[in-house]
Image: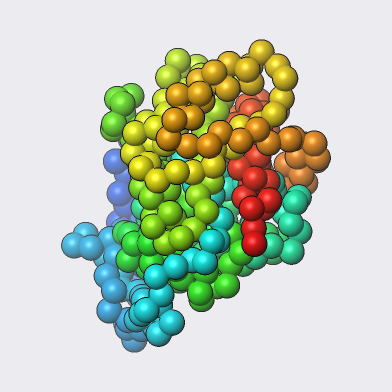
Amino acid sequence: MFQALAYPGLVGRPVPGDEVLLSVGALDLGLGTGGYALVVALPSRLPADEPTAGHMVKARYTPLQTIVDGAEERHPELAKATSVDGMPVVVADLHSSVPAVLAGILKARPSARIAYVMTDGGALPLWFSRTVDGLQTAGWLTGTVTVGQAFGGDLECVTTHSGLLAARHVLHADIAVVAQGPGNLGTGSVWGFSGVACGEAINAAAVLDGRPVAALRVSSADARERHQGLSHHSLTAYGKVALARADVALPDVPTEFWDGVAAQASALSERHTVVRVPVDGLDAALRACPVPLSTMGRGLDEDYPAFLAAACAGRLAATVMD
């Protein structure tokens, strides 16, 4: 027995008794986030034809490519926009970091308007994220922007650059958080992981006159050596791919674990500014999060440093708001 996932915006809304065509490749492989049977079509009851709102195509040249209304064309203010006017931009490797980043921001700036810019390194439909749905319902997010091949946000954009401009000038965000959707892709190699895009997001924020803030990927519980303490993903994305300078948030906690992370993060200090961030009040902020905190199947208390590092990035971003 298994469950299948259908996106009504792509295939229509199934009802009991419908015949469904399923894609089960990821399910057969026993994958984590992506391990679902996905409804490809309802062969005996196709969805009604809907009028096309725009002509931007995402998931291009796949059977389920979708046509969306691009923000760059709908909002004339984006045609000439070249700057985000110093807006802090928090960049994180994992989708699971997003609620913790928001907790850190809102602890410092409860009225901050925060936009989530979702890149296409993980899930392409934003609809897959129950986390984002819960954060929007709770009022923690002002809006969402899906960029690249990702789709389903409040705004649709072509690139991370135009997505950040839309966050600032259309959603009027004070802070943007950039992260891939659920289900990042990694191979165990130095370069073969989707989080490399974090470095490119730092560059995008900087070239648009933003204030890049890097959230470190940290773990005290990951069994894989390459992710213990400070993940090699952060060292690669921020230490090699990011060419622009960023503020790197490091929890200011005097313990052996965090001293070890600080030693690892020192490799980033030539290119970036490593900032020690106080953690007072962040535990309560994380525990008050309106959505469950989970990374790689581990909750807050099972891998506490992962969420604390993300919350510190949010706090740091909030302190540099104009």
Task: Give the residue displayed 42% in from the left and 48% down from the top.
Answer: 202
Task: Give the residue displayed 40% in from the left and 46% down from the top.
Answer: 244
Q: Position of residue 194 (x, y in %)?
A: 35, 40
Horizontally, residue 168 falls left or right of residue 191, namely: right
Taking the view exactly as shown, the residue that stands out farthest to the front is: 270
Q: Position of residue 36 (x, y in %)?
A: 41, 44
Task: Give the residue displayed 75% in from the left and 39% down from the top.
Answer: 282
Horizontally, residue 297 falls left or right of residue 278, namely: left
Q: Position of residue 46 (x, y in %)?
A: 31, 73
Residue 232: name its quadrant: top left
Front-most of residues 76 and 154: 76
Horizontally, residue 176 falls left or right of residue 183, namely: right
Residue 56: name its quadrant: bottom left
Q: Quadrant of the C terminus?
A: bottom right
| Res. 207 visible in picture | yes
Task: Give the residue displayed 38% in from the left and 36% down from the top.
Answer: 237
The colour scheme applied to this rendered structure is: rainbow
Q: Position of residue 153 (x, y in %)?
A: 47, 66
